[in-house]
């Protein structure tokens, strides 16, 4: 199944049925009065969150949806049938945006949640509605109102408690593989992860959290280099970020400098996302001697001016991973409790989420605009933008799969 996290669709609600003009005609009854019925309401269109879906691929090619029209009224005071509502299932975590105004219409974050996106047209009135003591044979009717129509943009952001950050080949996929049942692709070349991978981490019998691995960032990602920062939006809903740093890179590069590259790209994508709680995780410690581990650790702390939580692990050998996941679970529990007890903290997190959402959307919209210019033959002033590989064009039939394993 192809992983599609952005689509544009057009929705058209059903028109209301027209009112009927009719007069009673029965044997032995003279001058029968009006008996034209009302039309039926047009069907509305709803989007509903479905926990069994994890991609928007169903809307990749079928992009126009129209609800049923209301039936016209009939004689003998018969009301027209109402048009059937159209319910479109989408994955949990889908944001619905008006494509013309960029207004956020709604956010479906819980299974079964339903959102009205196009209201059906109201029914027309039959001539029975207009009869009175002074107008006994009305010939007035009203037509049904047209249904609403909208161009929508659907954005899927995977729902995860913890998100992983890091350069390609820093060991993010190995980490999620070692602490959960997820089986993402692992190889000794960059960009083996092309789509977000989700895994459920169980702590004991009754506690668990979801962790998300996104494709690695490289220098210039905020301008579109490599896979760009399009997948960083999946981290905007997370509650904690784990910054995975390779302590023993194969190319001999400086781990501290590699960490700074990721932080710079993250800040360009959304400065507010830098305020999200973030832990530093130094990976591949098994490839170094204890003296080398301590030296690299101190260098990273100094260059990053790091004062937050720091863990040293080996995801491949599963050294230190258990204590890290237990610490994450404690943090998530304490965070939930603090939100319930401290209203100021809860308001701060709500404001932070809104700021991250707006900054991320503005950044991605800028990249989309620059991409549109390139497709129209206008060269961007930024050379790195011209090097973006349009790997996700609609003409590409072969795509990666999303993995979600409990």
Image: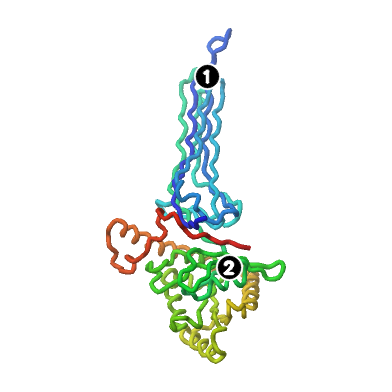
Q: Which residue appears farthest toward the top when viewing the image? A: 28
Q: Which residue is mark 1?
A: 34
> Total number of numbered labels?
2
Q: Residues within 10 Å of mark 2 (few under 14, many from 20)?
A: many
Quick check: 103 above or below 287? above
**Considering depth in this image, is 113 or 229 the residue closer to the camera?**
229
Q: Which residue is mark 2?
A: 211
Residue 151 in sight here: yes
Q: Which residue appears farthest toward the bottom when viewing the image? A: 291
Q: Left or right of 332: which side holds 163?
A: left
Residue at the (50%, 79%) spot, across then down? 246
Mark carried by residue 8: none
Residue 347 in sight here: no
Residue at the (56%, 73%) spot, across then down? 174
Q: Position of residue 393 (x, y in %)?
A: 40, 56
Choose top left, top right, bottom left or bottom right for residue 201.
Answer: bottom right
In three-dimensional space, the C-alpha distance between marks 2 and 1, rounded to whole angstroms, equals: 67 Å
**Considering depth in this image, is 303 or 2 the residue closer to the camera?**
2
Quick check: 233 above or below 262? above
Quick check: 48 above or below 166? above
Residue at the (52%, 86%) spot, across then down? 297
């Amino acid at each position: 199944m192809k992983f599609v996290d952005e689509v544009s669709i057009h929705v058209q609600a059903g028109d209301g049925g027209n009112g009927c003009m009719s007069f009673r005609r029965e044997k032995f009854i003279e001058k029968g009065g009006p008996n034209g019925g009302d039309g039926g309401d047009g069907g509305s269109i709803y989007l509903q969150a479905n926990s069994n879906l994890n991609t928007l691929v169903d809307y990749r090619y079928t992009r126009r949806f129209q609800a049923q029209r209301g039936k016209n009224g009939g004689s003998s005071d018969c009301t027209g049938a109402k048009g059937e509502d159209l319910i479109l299932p989408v994955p949990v975590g889908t944001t619905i945006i008006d494509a013309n105004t960029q207004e956020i219409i709604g956010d479906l974050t819980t299974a079964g949640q339903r959102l009205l996106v196009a209201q059906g047209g109201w029914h027309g009135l039959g001539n029975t509605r207009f009869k009175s003591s002074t107008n006994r044979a009305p010939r007035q009717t009203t037509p049904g109102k047209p249904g609403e129509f909208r161009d929508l943009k659907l954005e899927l952001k995977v729902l995860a408690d913890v998100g992983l950050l890091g350069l390609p080949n820093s060991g993010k996929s190995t980490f999620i593989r070692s602490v959960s049942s997820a089986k993402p692709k692992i190889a000794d070349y960059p960009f083996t992860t092309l789509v977000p991978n989700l895994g459920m981490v169980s702590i004991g019998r009754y506690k668990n959290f979801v962790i998300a691995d996104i494709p690695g960032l490289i220098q210039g990602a905020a301008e579109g280099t490599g896979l760009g920062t399009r997948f960083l939006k999946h981290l905007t809903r997370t509650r904690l970020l784990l910054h995975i740093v390779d302590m023993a890179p194969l190319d001999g590069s400086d781990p501290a400098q590699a960490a700074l590259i990721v932080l710079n790209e993250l800040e360009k994508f959304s400065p507010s996302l830098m305020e999200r709680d973030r832990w530093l995780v130094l990976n591949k410690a098994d490839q170094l001697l204890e003296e080398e581990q301590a030296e690299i650790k101190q260098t990273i702390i100094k260059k990053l001016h790091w004062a937050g939580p720091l863990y040293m692990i080996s995801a491949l050998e599963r050294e230190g991973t258990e204590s890290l996941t237990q610490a994450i679970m404690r943090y998530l529990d304490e965070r939930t409790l603090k939100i319930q007890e401290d209203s100021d903290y809860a308001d701060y997190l709500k404001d932070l989420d809104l700021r991250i959402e707006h900054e991320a959307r503005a950044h991605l919209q800028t990249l989309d605009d620059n991409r549109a210019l390139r497709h129209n033959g206008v060269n961007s002033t930024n050379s790195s933008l011209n090097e973006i590989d349009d790997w996700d064009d609609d003409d590409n039939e072969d795509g990666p799969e999303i993995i979600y394993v409990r």
